[in-house]
Amino acid sequence: MNPELQGREFPPTEPYLVGREKVREFAAAVFSTSPLNFDYHAAVAAGYADVVAPPTFAVVVQERTLTQLLSLPEAGIDFSRVVHGDQRFSYTRPIVAGDELTARLTVSSVKSLGGHSMVTADSVITDSTGAHVVTAISTLVVRGDE
Amino acid sequence: MTVAVGDVIAEKTYEISRDSLVHYAGASGDFNPIHYRDDIAQSVGLDGVLAHGMLTMGIAVQPVVEWLGTRGTITDYQVRFTRPVPVGPAGNAAITVVAKVGVVDDEGLRIDLTVTFDGATVLGKAQVRVALAAA
């Protein structure tokens, strides 16, 4: 992998509009039972504008930034050798249906370890007002030749 | 809500099937075929299909979400993927989540998750930070 990637910033992704049915579909897929994820009235009663997305829903938006990184020819990342090492989400607030989210990726670290490479990418996700919603941090391990 | 360090707030087992992986692929947009095609998984040196790490991560936090309800919000959630979860074409992979209070401080709670499949942990340093709503 290209060590000069460290510090690289990517342009913001096109806005992603969070749909109510998408939130429900994702919530069902992660075995959620929370009324906040499914029931509009329960979410509104709890003070939200619409149904609340599960904590890991942010990956759907983050994925668009990781695609930018993985498809960059000069990054030299062979997708078939990529393994997900670590994942972290730091939230200012939960994502709710109706949010229009944009993500901006920065490569915070590139390391080599015993023939493998590790790249850490921070994706800062903001809403249509520019306010921070969540930062998604992934460490990807690219396996070396064996 | 009174909780102390060491309290187990939830314990739950989830049955993941191949259908669950297809459902998650569609819901998340992660269509990497190693999560639904054995032949492709085997072509990259795996024994067979594996669950998406992000599916395991997504499921593992659910006992905390259920326990929390509307009493607070999750402010941070992190995991390390230490061991894959194989999911065969028939039958289920059972994942067990134990959620225990690791820290109580001014910011709220840190809930530590122990996530096991087939007797071995599959996530490392799985930690959820929770901020409790003002009483």
Image (cartoon, coloured by chain):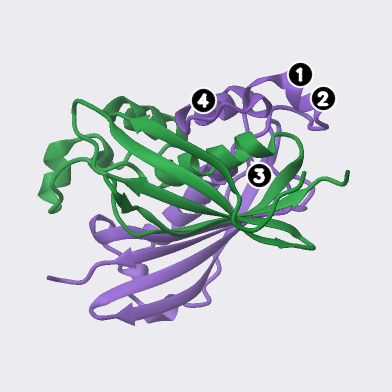
- Disc 2 from disc 4: Cα separation: 21 Å
Q: Confirm or deny contact between disc 1 and disc 2 (CB under 8 A).
A: yes
Which hue is chain A drawn in? Answer: purple
**Which amino acid, by three-letter code, is at mark 4?**
Glu
Query: Which residue corresponds to mark 4?
Result: A25
- Disc 1 from disc 2: Cα separation: 6 Å
Rendering quarter of residue A146 = bottom left
Query: Which residue corresponds to mark 2?
Result: A45
- Mark 2 lies on a secondary structure that is helix
Mark 4: few, some, or many residues within 10 Å (few <14, many ≥20)? some
Relative to B104, is B113 on the left or the right? left
- Disc 3 from disc 1: Cα separation: 23 Å
Q: Residue at x 26, y 43 (%)?
A: B50
**Which amino acid, by three-letter code, is at mark 2?**
Ala
Query: Compared to A124, does B118 lie above or below?
Result: above
Quadrant in which the N terminus of chain B appears: top right
Query: Which residue corresponds to mark 1?
Result: A41
- Disc 3 from disc 4: Cα separation: 18 Å
